[in-house]
Image: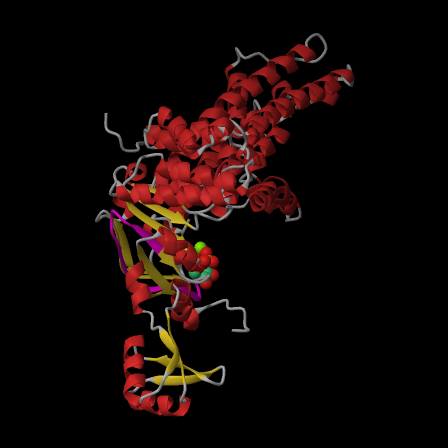
Amino acid sequence: MSAHPTLASVIRSEWLKFRSVRSSIMGVAITFVLTIGIGALITASIRTHWTAHPEAHIGFDPVTTSLGGTLFAQFAVGVIGALFVTAEYSSGSIRSTLAATPRRVEVVLAKLAVLVGSLLVVSEVAVFVTFLMGQAIYSGVVPTASLSTPTVLRAVLFGGLYLTLLGTIGMALGWLLRQSAACISVFTSLILVLPIVTFLLPSSWQNTIGRFEPSTLGQSMESVSPPAHAFSAGASLLVLALYATVLMAAAATALTRRDA
Amino acid sequence: MIAIEHLTKRYRKTVAVDDLDLVVQPGVVTGFLGPNGSGKSTTMRVIMGLDRPSRGRATVNGRPYHDLRDPLREVGALLEAKAVHPGRSARNHLRALAASNKIPFSRVDEVLEFVGLASVATKRVGDFSLGMGQRLGIAAALLGDPGVLLFDEPVNGLDPEGIRWIRDLFRSLAAEGRTVFVSSHLMSEMAVTADQIIVIGKGHLITQGSVSDLTAAAKGAVVVRGNDRERLERALRAAGATVEVVNDDALRVGELSAEAVGQLAFDEGVVLFELTPERASLEEVYMALTAGVVEYGSGSS
Ligand SMILES: Nc1ncnc2c1ncn2[C@@H]1O[C@H](COP(=O)(O)OP(=O)(O)OP(=O)(O)O)[C@@H](O)[C@H]1O
Ligand SMILES: [Mg+2]
């Protein structure tokens, strides 16, 4: 066995770091609580106010509504991704990290692998649990969806991918901005402020620009049939994955060029 | 061995290191001295491959840091105290470093034991005192049992027992044939710890040499007092000495040895009451050397 650092050994190191601080553990717990808890609140409230008038329910989607908690959990995963990087800068441990692994791209890849691996498991478990729980709450009163329908299965699966990709975007911002507060403001602006700004534009622009916003991409990914003027679910996944890739590439370039 | 060739490091407007050339040899403790802001930490960061040089280069064992195959087994460094996530335990911090370089976890417990932190290995580093943080940094530096060690201001926050411990540690590491490079802004500390001294100011090399070379190079003075001050003063000046009157009847003589002053007095027939060589301390040598390059001086001097 050769002794020098390899991508596998750096991944082991980053995995140890990820699970040895409270912020990651708390972040994961909050992701579960928000996805499942808010999903339960939304579905229970829909069930309570459900009326017999069919015209009141045009466009009702039992999948999207049960995944409503991801609208809140997306901030939790963004923070998990950002803090995994910015905590190294605020404590100064980034210097020991980079001294131990001078090939900095390996550090970027290892942290990414650990984050994507963890978030994929956490998000998929959370969305499937909240989906099944939502359908259980609906059953008997509100129409339900089943995972045996391919588009339903896809919508739930993509819900977990949406969260994972947003966590990755949070991580890329962490590398680029190196400060927790800056990351959180930029991340929040991307998700919350961007749609408001677009809303102020003329409506033809709204439709063209709006479909590129992370939140619209998410809505499309998590519903059985995409909302009006949005990309298809598959195209939305590709666009969001492209954002994450471009930002991560920028992050790796910045890290290799800048002083630590 | 650490070699620095024509190293210049510029941060926007500041020139932190300016065309520096150094060689740090194995087997001795090398003290790296300079006033605040003289570029010591910057030089160490460049050696560690953390900051990119604007010009020139730094190598460890003949290779730039980036090309080291096995970084932690070749170089260990303590750059900042407590540069560890405050929520992580000392053991997990070291294990993460060890894992990246495939160092067995048993070594983590060994170094924790060695620096005296074994009993707090599972405590959050955020609760550590400055001195404990410093010991953890030393443990991290020793983790890969490297042949080259860098320590930036290692005695900060250590108690007298800790300072003595670290001094002995540096000596024994050097005695094992390792390269030990220690920065400080206190000459008094380095005078008792280091064998070789490198002094920089404003990013320039000011002097380098062994501790005894530096003290020997210091120009001492001779204080002399006799029964005919004016006659003695005239004779000394004629012999090329610099003379200054102190306490009305004594003279401080520069450029001449005590022997030469005594001989001159005898030749002139002056009876001497006092003949005292004044040897400059290493601290005074250092103050004199860096007097012109102190960046953040206190104004009064
Ligand atoms: N990352 C940086 N960005 C901008 N300027 C810097 C940076 N690092 C150091 N400097 C500047 O470079 C100069 C040298 O700083 P450095 O920290 O290397 O000095 P030092 O000898 O370690 O000082 P001290 O004894 O106070 O630790 C200073 O003027 C400092 O302000
Ligand atoms: Mg310094």
Q: Nearer the viewer, residue B239 or B41?
A: B239
In the rendering, at what x and y percent does residue A121 appear?
A: 49, 21
Q: On the image, which quarter does residue A131 sit in?
A: top right
- Out of B123 and A198, give the one closest to the viewer: B123
Q: Is residue A113 visible?
A: no
**On the picture, is B151 further left or further right than B122?**
left
Q: Is residue A38 left or right of residue B217?
A: right
For ligand 1, give the image quadrant.
bottom left
Residue B230 x, y percent position in the rendering: 40, 92
Looking at the image, residue B240 lies above or below residue A206 = below
- Please tell me which residue is depicted at 31% across the width and 81% down the height of the picture: B261
Q: Is residue B122 magenta?
A: no
Query: Can residue A207 be seen?
Result: yes
Left or right: B163 as drawn, with respect to B145: right
Residue at x 39%, y 47% (from the top left corner): B151
| Residue in view at x 27 percent, y 87 percent | B267
As displayed, is residue A193 above or below residue B261? above
Return the x and y of residue A8 as percentages of the image width and height: 33, 28
Query: What is the magenta range?
Result: B12-31
Is the magenta region chiefly helix, strand or loop? strand
